[in-house]
Amino acid sequence: MPLPAQSKPTACLALADGTVFYGTGFGANGETVAELCFNTALTGYQEIMTDPSYAGQIVTFTFPHIGNVGVNPDDDETGDPVAAGMVVKWDPTQSSSWRATEELKAWLTRTGRIAIGGIDTRRLTRAIRQQGAPHAALAHNPDGEFDVEALVAKARTWSGLEGLDLAKDVTCAQSYKWDEMRWAWPDGFARQNAPKHKVVAVDYGAKRNILRCLASAGCDVTVLPATATAEEVLAHNPDGVFLSNGPGDPAATGTYAVPMIKTILDSTELPMFGICLGHQMLALALGAKTVKMNHGHHGANHPVKENATGKVEITSMNHGFAVDAQSLPDGVEETHVSLFDGSNCGIAMTNRAVFSVQQHPEASPGPQDSYYLFERFAQAMDDRKSA
């Protein structure tokens, strides 16, 4: 379906149901196929694009001012963008922040990520909410030539995230130490030089700010790959075990992660804390189930209630799968719930310091209501040492 030469777009977004959006391309040239989601955060587009949990997803940003603060190395959550692509309403403007070291367009081009602007993101977001997160093909061609039928076919034949283990693709290649703490004025990122607790963090796609929060809570952090065995974890003689965030289907990652977690739970009394995919891994290891959500939770304004206190926390979310609260076994309680849809956002063992949450307490930029969970983890390690 060729368009008149004078109105040819340079990017095309094709959904599996045949819906096609044309716009202005920027970033890298080429094509990518992934699940399409939307994120409602007003800030932090760089952190979102570099969050490993977005592997296999194209992110639609509902906030129109994307690119206005540029990018800089300090705000990366991992080395390069992980999200497959970016969809925005307006073509990014020139950056106007003193922190910027590079323009968004140049950064996306250099790192091989495709983006499209000029899209009615409100319409697209409504479609995702009503019909579920679709499979989509995104193409950028400065010549404006697109084989739309082929793009739709690629979106339709893509396997999707269900059954897909992406943690292996984004995890670290080998173990490493982490001592950088959260950013603080005026010195920036300080180093943890007097840690109280040895923590092994299993990396299913860990964000850097999670590791910073652990270090700020007094932890000497050793990061291990997602495929680490229980023997490899325990060889570090940790005071606690942390299970990180990550992408993909938890059931697929669970084929190797769940046996490791079960072994540690059965053979030790170590405190354990999980976030996002780590939350889902812990739930599976305890005997619960996970389910694919219609369009997931992606944003920095999600209200979550802590059941024990009734306190409502404004949180950052990024997940397309959820723990089925109805499947929680005896000895495991639901600790947090989403006030948007009632879905599970936290669990804990009733007789041990083993707990996890679906939200991202480390969110930065974003709400800080859930930072206390890192202190709770540190206190659990203190209590075990005292006992």
Image (cartoon, grey):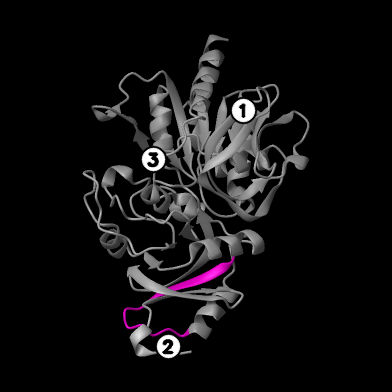
Q: Which residue is mark 1?
A: 354
Q: Is residue 173 visible?
A: no
Determine whether label 1 and label 2 are within 8 Å by CB: no
The image quadrant of residue 269 is top right
Label count reads: 3
Q: Which residue is mark 3?
A: 208
The residue at the point 59 percent across, 68 percent down is: 159
Closer to the chain start, of discs 1 and 3, is 3
Front residue (pair 137, 354): 137
Between marks 1 and 3 in the image, the one whose residue lies nearer the viewer: 3
The image quadrant of residue 9 is bottom left
Q: Residues within 10 Å of mark 3 (few under 14, many from 20)?
A: many
Q: Quadrant of the C terminus?
A: top right
- Residues in magenta, as a range: 134-147
The residue at the point 50 percent across, 60 percent down is: 56
Q: Residues within 10 Å of mark 2 (few under 14, many from 20)?
A: few
Front residue (pair 66, 283): 66
Residue type of the residue flagged with mark 3: Arg
Between marks 2 and 3 in the image, the one whose residue lies nearer the viewer: 2
Residue type of the residue flagged with mark 1: Val
Q: Position of residue 106 (x, y in %)?
A: 26, 62
Q: Whole-Å distance between the Cαs marked 1 and 2?
A: 58 Å
